[in-house]
Amino acid sequence: MSTTQVLCTNGMIFSEETTRNWPRVLRGFLFSVGMIYFFLGVAIVADLFMAAIEKVTSRRRKILGPNGRTITVKVWNETVATLTLMALGSSAPEIFLSIIDIVKKSFHF
């Protein structure tokens, strides 16, 4: 029984053929720096999203109560904001992988 090895030749940034002759330490360092860079990007986007959610959920408005007094109520439910953040956190990796796949295929499905 013979086994064949298939190497990926079309990487998004570096192909296998390009990085094959690089020292292992250099490859590890460059890919680690790249991962840290991408994680920082996701952290910045999540921080901006969190600030926007806080601003939206802190809004209040005044309504006239049944006894004629003015009551201040929240416009948004905090539970909805929490569930939105949970959905974003759990789905973000799949969304990013789908975007990368679409870009890699030159926007052809």
Image (spheres, rainbow, N blue to C red):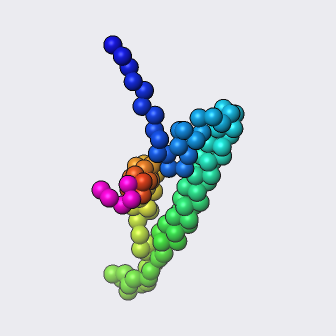
Residue 93, placed above or below residue 80: above
Q: Quadrant of residue 42?
A: bottom right
Residue 68 position, x and y percent, is: 38, 86
Say which residue appears at 42% left-offset and 31% top-offset.
6
Residue drawn at 47 percent across, 41 percent down: 9
Q: Is residue 52 above or below residue 86?
A: below
Q: Is residue 7 above or below residue 12?
A: above
Q: Position of residue 11 (x, y in %)?
A: 49, 45
Q: As rendered, which of 25 and 95 lies closer to the eye?
A: 25
Residue furthest top in the image: 1
Which residue is painted at 59% across and 35% down in the image? 20
Q: Is residue 70 magenta?
A: no
Q: Would you identify the image quadrant in which residue 81 lies?
A: bottom left
The C terminus lies in which quarter of the figure? bottom left
Judge whether 72 appears above or below 107 on screen. below
Number of callouts: 0
| Spot occupied by residue 53 in the image (x, y as percentages of width and height) | 49, 66
Name the residue at 36% across, 16% down: 2
Q: Nearer the viewer, residue 50 or 4?
A: 4
Residue 60 seen anywhere in this rendered image of the structure: yes
Magenta segment, prevailing SS (helix, strand or loop): loop
Quadrant position of the N terminus in the picture: top left
Which region shows up in magenta?
105-109
Judge whether residue 43 can be spotted in this image. no
Nearer to me, 33 or 27: 27
